[in-house]
Image (tube, rainbow, N blue to C red):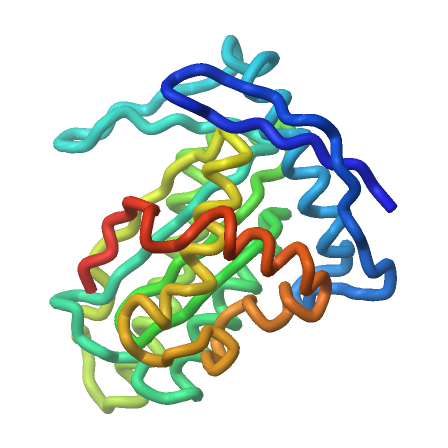
């Protein structure tokens, strides 16, 4: 039994809620990681709270042309979205979805980033990833990881389609999450993305998502997140 303290933003003011127990199944693990899901969630919650008060002086903003300033923090969680060029449905079968998922797992692991949640659809994907501690040049590392993933998968898709130089990827977006509410809301949003886009009527039916692993690890917690953070309320660019 662990205690987890929740912090929410309400009308611009931070409010702490009382500590409450969170049930954990100590034998459960995500397929893509070796740390238990409950331990990971608790650690992320604590790290997010720390950034609200401790890491403001260490935060680094990167300004890109035609885009708002980007916040980059080590040991923080990010949501990343990437889309296919002209919204074409290149990942139309399980083999191709497996290709992109395997590439994502490989390259993020290579740079010691942890994947907390994922969903792979036919023309885009969403990730929740956690950066390692004391990682310098985070903006460059994220860019390098994504570029490696997209370069490799584009090459393979061209091979499969017997093409050369066919444009596959369009762009990607990253956002640093600094509050618990933001984390859980986007966790739920990612898991319900196949429902949002009309692929399935139940997230359990979508094979290329971390939803079933999350439920198997802690069903009670998964249902709490679904109830408290409806995916319809999250505003994420997702017109694919």
| Above or below: residue 146 compared with residue 207 | above
State the residue at coordinates (76%, 46%).
22
Seen from the viewer's position, the closer of residues 236 and 143 is 236
The location of residue 83, given as percent across then percent down, is 26, 61
The location of residue 110, given as percent across then percent down, is 60, 54
State the residue at coordinates (41%, 70%).
120
State the residue at coordinates (69%, 31%).
5
Is residue 63 toward the left or the right of residue 33 in the image? left
| Above or below: residue 11 compared with residue 191 | above
Seen from the viewer's position, the closer of residues 182 and 82 is 182
Q: Place residue 51 in its image quadrant.
A: top right
The location of residue 33, given as percent across then percent down, is 70, 60
Total marks placed: 0
Name the quadrant of the C terminus: bottom left
Q: Place residue 65 in its image quadrant.
A: top left
| Above or below: residue 44 compared with residue 28 | above
Is residue 57 toward the left or the right of residue 27 in the image? left
Is residue 167 toward the left or the right of residue 194 in the image? left
Residue furthest out toward the top = 57
Seen from the viewer's position, the closer of residues 152 and 93 is 93
State the residue at coordinates (73%, 36%).
4
């Amino acid at each position: 039994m662990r205690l987890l303290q929740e912090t929410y933003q309400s009308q611009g003011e931070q409010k702490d809620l009382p500590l409450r127990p969170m049930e954990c199944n100590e034998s459960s693990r995500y397929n893509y990681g070796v740390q238990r899901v409950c331990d990971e969630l608790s650690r992320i919650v604590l790290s997010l709270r720390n950034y609200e008060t401790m890491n403001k002086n260490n935060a680094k903003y990167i300004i890109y042309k035609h885009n708002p300033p980007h916040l980059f923090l080590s040991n923080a969680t990010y949501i990343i979205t990437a889309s296919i060029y002209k919204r074409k449905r290149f990942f139309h079968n399980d083999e191709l979805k497996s290709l992109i998922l395997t590439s994502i797992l490989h390259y993020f692991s290579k740079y010691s980033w942890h994947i907390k949640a994922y969903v792979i659809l036919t023309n885009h994907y969403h990730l929740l990833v956690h950066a390692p501690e004391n990682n310098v040049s985070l903006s460059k590392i994220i860019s390098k990881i994504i570029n490696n993933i997209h370069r490799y998968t584009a090459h393979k898709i061209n091979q499969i389609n017997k093409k050369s130089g066919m444009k596959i990827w369009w762009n990607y977006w990253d956002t640093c999450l600094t509050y618990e509410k933001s984390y859980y809301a986007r966790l739920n949003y990612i898991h319900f993305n196949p429902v949002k886009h009309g692929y399935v009527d139940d997230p359990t039916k979508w094979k290329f998502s971390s939803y079933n692993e999350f439920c198997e690890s802690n069903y009670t917690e998964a249902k709490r997140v679904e109830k408290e953070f409806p995916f319809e309320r999250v505003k994420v660019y997702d017109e694919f």
